[in-house]
Image (cartoon, rainbow, N blue to C red):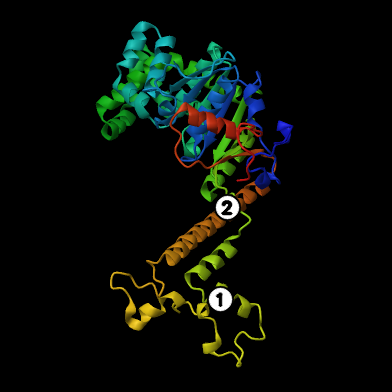
């Protein structure tokens, strides 16, 4: 073992020799780091990564809450919680010897919207809004609402100043960064012509308002009423009028959260798999974050494959497999060793079939079966004179050949992943990268999350010194 843990090579460090290496532990342990946002394409282990980082930070003494926006329930299952909701739940089984805690929650979009209404409107107006049919549709799944509510919830958690670290698990694919657009979208919606038109009667008020409505809006409302339905349009008007006093608060809070995401205490981590589509999405995230002046900590390259026998190339493995399957393709049979090494005699006109050793021909019978071939074979004894797929020798050869071909496939996979990583690092050499080896199964408990956390660290003395 190396006497200095810092000198121990990172798992997969050989593959990252030409890229900056991301060290996750200092990021999680730094008291100045208050928010970590995990973003990336779907199906790359983003939720697991967020949970593992939250657990690792908690067991190092920080009070952590993990907020997942992903509709999948894997986070709750891996933490041993029956279900997650809009309220942080403390996770049991965490090593709290360092004084840390781990809490987890899942964004409830409608409940978050309800909380905003209840907190920023008087009881009468809040009741009118919550009972409005258009509001019910808007809060349950209107396009863009989830991303805005994610910003609202993040802002609420940070404002409470109850946690040392907030880890955010974003939705999959490019919508993971849609919350960056939430303030701009909200402003466009609130300042849009339709909203101004719908608010106009209420703002003008009295007879002038009614006159404006009757003269200026009759044609528009008539058309909209036919398209949307008269009752629906009335519900929208009622909702807009009730929410008018809250619109400024929405915009202000969204802008504040946007600035919070740009602050030094926030770090974005892009999670990807070593696959072309996933790294293409990762490149999009990196470029988008740079354009928005968001602090990018680095890339977590998840589910990276490796092999302890990578000195055996795919070509050599395939050649050996072919030789086992048909020795006549690449002669390496023991009986032909002398002939293969003696070009003066191999294939010479002076060499006769009768002079060749019996083992030189794959189908030749071993000497101890001569009596059986002469007709004295015991009827209860199987014929082993000609090797078949059922003989032990051929079974071993077939097994070895299959393993060699599997190894060749693995080597091709490793080479493909390496090329994909190299293209990304060549395009974004400024991005620090850490690799997490692919595991044989899914992570479904705290022990699995703890293992992922160990693998996320640049130097992990808990793991054996093996090259993957």
Residue 412: which quarter of the image? bottom right
Left or right position of 51 against 114? right
| Residue at image mark 1 | 335
Location of residue 392 in the rendering, given as x and y in whole percent from the top left corner: 42, 64
What residue is pinned by disc 2? Answer: 414
Q: Is residue 268 left or right of residue 237?
A: right
Secondary element at tag 1:
helix
Q: Is residue 361 above or below residue 395?
A: below
Measured in 3D between alpha carbons, the distance from the residue under mark 1 to the one under mark 2, in whole angstroms, is: 36 Å
Quadrant location, the N terminus = top right
Query: Looking at the image, can residue 178 be seen?
Result: no
Q: Position of residue 154 (x, y in %)?
A: 51, 21
- Whether label 1 touches label 2, CB < 8 Å: no
The 10 Å Cα crowd at callout 2, few under 14, some 14 to 19, many 20 or more, is: some
Q: Position of residue 180 (x, y in %)?
A: 54, 30
> Residue, x 64% and y 32% (percent of image)?
461
């Amino acid at each position: 073992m190396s006497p200095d843990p810092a000198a121990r090579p990172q798992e997969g460090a050989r593959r990252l020799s030409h890229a900056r290496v991301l060290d996750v532990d200092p990021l999680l342990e730094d008291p100045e780091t208050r928010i970590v946002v995990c973003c990336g394409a779907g199906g790359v282990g983003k939720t697991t990564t967020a949970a593992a980082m939250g657990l690792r930070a908690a067991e190092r003494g920080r009070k952590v809450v993990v907020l997942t926006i992903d509709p999948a329930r894997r986070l709750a299952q891996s933490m041993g919680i029956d279900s997650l909701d809009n309220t942080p739940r403390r996770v049991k089984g965490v090593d709290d010897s360092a004084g840390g805690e781990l809490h987890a929650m899942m964004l409830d979009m409608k409940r978050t919207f309800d909380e905003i209404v209840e907190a920023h409107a008087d009881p009468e107006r809040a009741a009118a809004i919550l009972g409005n049919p258009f509001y019910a549709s808007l809060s349950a799944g209107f396009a863009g609402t989830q991303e805005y509510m994610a910003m609202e919830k993040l802002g609420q958690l940070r404002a409470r100043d109850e946690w040392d670290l907030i880890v955010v698990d974003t939705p999959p694919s490019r919508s993971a960064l849609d919350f960056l657009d939430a303030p701009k979208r909200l402003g466009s919606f609130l300042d849009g012509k339709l909203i101004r038109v719908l608010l106009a009667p209420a703002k003008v008020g009295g007879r002038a308002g009614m006159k404006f409505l009757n003269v200026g809006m009759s044609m528009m409302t008539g058309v909209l009423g036919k398209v949307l339905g008269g009752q629906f349009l009335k519900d929208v008007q009622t909702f807009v009028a009730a929410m008018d006093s809250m619109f400024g608060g929405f915009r202000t809070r969204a802008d504040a959260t946007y600035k919070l995401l740009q602050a030094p205490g926030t770090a974005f981590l892009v999670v990807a798999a070593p696959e072309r589509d996933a790294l293409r999405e990762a490149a999009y995230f990196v470029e988008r974050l740079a354009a928005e002046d968001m602090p990018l900590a680095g890339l977590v390259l998840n589910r990276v494959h490796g092999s302890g026998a990578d000195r055996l190339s795919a070509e050599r493995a395939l050649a050996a497999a072919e030789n086992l399957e048909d020795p006549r393709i690449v002669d390496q049979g023991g009986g032909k060793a002398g002939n293969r090494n003696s070009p003066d005699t191999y294939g010479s006109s002076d060499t006769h079939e009768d002079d060749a050793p019996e083992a030189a021909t794959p189908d030749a019978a071993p000497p101890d079966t001569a009596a059986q071939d002469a007709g004295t074979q015991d009827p209860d004894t199987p014929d082993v004179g000609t090797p078949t797929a059922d003989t032990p020798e051929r079974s071993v050869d077939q097994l070895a050949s299959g393993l060699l071909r599997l190894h060749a496939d693995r080597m091709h996979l490793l080479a493909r992943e390496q090329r994909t990583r190299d293209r990304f690092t060549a395009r974004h050499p400024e991005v620090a990268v850490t690799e997490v080896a692919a595991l044989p199964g899914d992570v479904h408990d705290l022990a699995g999350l703890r293992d992922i956390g160990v693998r996320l660290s640049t130097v992990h003395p808990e793991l054996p010194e093996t090259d993957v």
